Image (cartoon, rainbow, N blue to C red):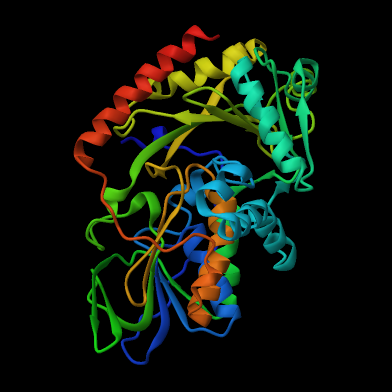
Amino acid sequence: MPAAFSDPVWRKPNAAAAFQSELSASGMLDAVIVGGGIMGLSTALHAARAGLSVQVLDTGAIGQGASGLNGGQVIPGLKYDPEWLTEHFGKERGEALVEFAASTADAVFDVIRVEKLAVPFTRNGWIQAAHTETALTAAANRDRQWRSRGADVELLDRAGIAAMTGARGYLGGWLDRRAGVIDPLSYTLELARVASAAGAGIAEQQRVVKLRRETGVWRVSTQGGAELRAKSVVLATNAYTDGLLPGLAQTIVPLHSFQIATAPLPADLAASILPGGQAVSDSRRILVYYRRSPDGRMVLGGRGRMALPSSAADWAHCERALIRLYPALAGVAIEKRWFGRVALTPDHLPHLHEPEQGLLAAVGCQGRGVGLMSALGKRMASYLASGDARQLPFPLSPIKPIPFHAFRQVGVAATIAWYRMLDAFER
């Protein structure tokens, strides 16, 4: 694919460190973490802070995957509301999960503050915008549940959401002030920097090709011929999961999230578009999400084609969504186009697995990976340090591949096309 068709608005600083820690076969590590995205780096940072010896191995460069390419929305909570979680998981586990879900945005902004990360951010909230009465009723139900638990949230009417977004077509929405936005590439690179400073080894361009357990020790082999020994292995590859752990890749549906960024907005337009700096996700079946970047651009994303993009036309659905919401932006140039990969699970919940002792895997961000994986990494580090499964917010579950997984991808593509047509009738 031509480089012009993967041109993100987030830029790696010229002075950003390269991570090439030495891989030594001598000695025993407490953990090898496969995957240098937010989940892997958060786990590494907190494990190193707890005194564990940790090595992160990433197939590519830090920030090259979805962790550095997402929209930078930091949203607390899960796809499900508190009452569903307590009903589904039982009162004790459900309430613990609600508490965890409520804390995921804090995990991001706390680490930025405590570790003094050089990450541009705004914490003025996230808006879930409702374009139908059904969506507005769901927003009111969500507002009631989180408000009863003391969350700083607010239900917005038509006038309120119009004032906060400047967008057309919404009946109302829901504001969660616990949320915010960050530069995701800066965040990922800074997590790597402080994890390295805390003692974690971080190595780029190190593809892991084999895992095997002998006499209670995990042996991790790389494509370059190195072999590491560790008490535990954490697979933090999410949507980039391959065949390293048989069956794991077949438990998720990887999707592409396509994004665009305009040129910096003229002052007269900028004054009325997201003046408070909030992020927005809408209620459509194939949702779009958008925000302002630190340099004043509009950034909008949504689900794209299943295949890799081959021309600027593959982002046309994002451009149409932008003009539908903000007709005044029709004359503003689209300067950046890029995409990342996200992982969905059939039940829309993250899945944690430990198929063998000391072999851990986490998949399924459902599009909320910045906060979720930051918080989950901290819990995963606690589990590595203590061996106490109560440190994990989600129960450990067996790996269950999706039946007819190869056909699921085709079905998802068809469903996206169908939902996009239904959304068009609800303009």
Q: Residue furthest bottom?
A: 27
Question: Which of the 4 image quadrants contains residue 135?
Answer: top right
Tell me where residue 200 appears, x and y as whole percent: 51, 77
Question: Which of the 4 image quadrants contains residue 407?
Answer: top left
Residue drawn where x is 27% and y is 55% of the image: 242
Residue drawn where x is 72% and y is 65% of the image: 116
Q: How many marks?
A: 0
Tell me where residue 52 appears, x and y as whole percent: 51, 83
Residue drawn where x is 32% and y is 30% of the image: 412
Residue in front for this viewpoint, 291 or 135: 135
Tell me where residue 152 appears, x and y as whole percent: 79, 43
Task: Classify 424 as above or below 409.
Answer: above
Residue in front for this viewpoint, 87 or 223: 87
Task: Residue 413: tell me if it is visible.
Answer: yes
Task: Report the quarter where the C terminus lies.
Answer: top right
Task: Report the quarter where the N terminus lies.
Answer: top left
Residue drawn where x is 36% and y is 83% of the image: 230
Task: Classify 321 as above or below 150.
Answer: above
Tell me where residue 360 appears, x and y as whole percent: 38, 68
Task: Residue 332: tell me if it is visible.
Answer: no
